[in-house]
């Protein structure tokens, strides 16, 4: 069908990039290095060089240490530059965001055991984000901005134990997994500010999983998650505290999956949020309470 719309504005930009990479692989030591040269016609910058290097060293049979350094460049999207409708106000003068990332880590690997720990530091400049400041009014728009500088530190730990390999098939527990991650940033949100990307993140997260089997056909998978998110969200407009800004609260979730396994079919029941906890994970949308799903998977021999 025809349209009365008349498009009178347009924009294009060209991205030119070159890649160079080289690997050195020895018996216990590996080294990878490379660089990317990028030029984008959307800015006045010349070719921007982004180097990266990663190294790892194996020792004491089951141990591996590694470290890396990488840089990156991200151009603002056309949405971030020009989307100024529906409660949004874009900034056409946004600068590209740049990131330098450092990471070190240690792994312990052997049959039945996998343990890993790592720490990292990210230095970001001109980080692109959408920010809403309700101190300017509850109808204030989401505005695209560059954060001048954001420094992020974090740690991650995980361990997995395969008890079938460690103890033997007589054990009804198959796997145990525990993981923890922590992130902290030096730039903080104001009490009346919301962030869609750069300044909203999971400060702490704990995950634990347990896989079990019974009677050779019955499998039970349990999962626990606790998380603490940094950031604010605006309460629903129709509530008594319409427009009020509140911080995210930590929450715990317990999920389970029960499966009866046969050679030709599986019967399963998924139970999510068994504790029926009301929580907000991202934004002001309340997440579902207890959620049960059942089904059958049948395998055809063709």
Image (cartoon, grey):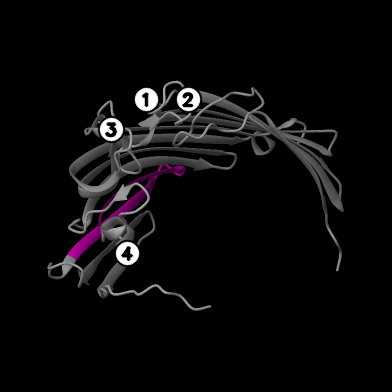
Compared to 140, does 11 lie above or below?
below
Q: Say if mark 1 contacts mark 2, CB within 8 Å.
A: yes
Q: Secondary structure at mark 4?
A: strand
Q: Which mark is residue 239?
A: 2
In the picture, measured across the screen, residue 225 lies left or right of residue 121, that is: right
Q: Earlier in the sequence, mark 4 or mark 3?
A: 4
Query: Between marks 3 and 1, how big is the CA–CA gap?
Result: 11 Å
Disc ID at residue 244: 1
The kind of secondary structure element at disc 3 is loop
Q: What is the CA distance from the residue labelled 4 to the residue labelled 1?
A: 56 Å
Whole-percent x, y for residue 207 in the image: 52, 31
Q: Are marks 4 and 2 in contact (CB under 8 Å)?
A: no
Around disc 4, counting alpha carbons within 10 Å, would you say few (fewer than 14), some (14 to 19), or many (20 or more)?
Answer: few
Task: Please report the residue visible at 29 percent of the width from the left and 56 percent of the height from the top.
Answer: 80
The magenta stretch is: 49-73
Location of residue 5 in the rendering, given as x and y in whole percent from the top left corner: 39, 72
Task: Tell me the CA gap for discs 1 and 2.
Answer: 9 Å
Mark 2, residues whose alpha carbon is within 10 Å: few (<14), some, or many (≥20)?
few
User: Considering the numbered disc 1 on the image, is that residue within a helix, a strand or a loop?
Assistant: loop
In front: label 4 or label 2: 2
Q: Earlier in the sequence, mark 1 or mark 2?
A: 2
Question: Is the residue 7 above or below the residue 157 in the image?
Answer: below
Which of pointers 4 and 1 lies earlier in the amino acid sequence?
A: 4
**Closer mark to the observer between disc 4 and disc 3:** 3
Which residue is the site of mark 3? 137
Residue 297 location, x and y as percent?
Answer: 81, 51
Pinpoint residue 126: horizontal percent, then vertical percent: 19, 50
């Amino acid at each position: 069908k025809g349209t009365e719309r008349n498009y009178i504005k347009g924009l294009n930009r060209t991205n030119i990039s070159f890649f160079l990479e080289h690997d050195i692989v020895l018996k216990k030591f590996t080294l990878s290095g490379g660089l990317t040269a990028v030029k984008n016609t959307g800015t006045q910058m010349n070719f921007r060089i982004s180097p990266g290097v990663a190294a790892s060293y194996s020792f004491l049979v089951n141990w591996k240490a590694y470290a890396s350094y990488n840089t990156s460049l991200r151009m603002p999207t056309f949405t971030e530059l020009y989307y100024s409708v529906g409660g949004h106000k874009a900034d056409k003068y946004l600068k590209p965001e740049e990131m330098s990332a450092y990471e070190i880590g240690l792994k312990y690997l052997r049959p039945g055991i996998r343990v890993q720990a790592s720490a990292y530091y990210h230095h970001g400049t001109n980080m692109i984000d959408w920010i809403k400041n309700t101190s300017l009014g509850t109808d204030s728009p989401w505005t695209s901005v560059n954060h001048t500088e954001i420094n992020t530190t974090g740690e991650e730990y995980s361990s997995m134990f395969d008890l079938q390999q460690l103890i033997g098939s007589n054990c009804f527990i198959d796997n145990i997994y525990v993981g923890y991650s922590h992130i902290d940033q030096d730039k903080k949100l104001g009490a009346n500010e919301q962030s869609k990307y750069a300044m909203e993140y999971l400060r702490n997260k704990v995950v634990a999983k347990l896989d079990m089997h019974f009677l050779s056909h019955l499998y039970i998978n349990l999962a626990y998650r606790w998380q603490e998110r940094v950031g604010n969200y605006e309460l629903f407009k129709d509530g008594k505290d319409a427009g009020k800004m509140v911080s995210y609260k930590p929450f715990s979730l317990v999920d389970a999956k029960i499966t009866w396994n046969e050679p030709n079919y599986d019967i399963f029941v998924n139970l999510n949020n068994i504790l029926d906890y009301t929580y907000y994970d991202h934004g002001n949308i309340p997440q579902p309470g207890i959620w049960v799903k059942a089904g059958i998977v049948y395998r055809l021999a063709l």
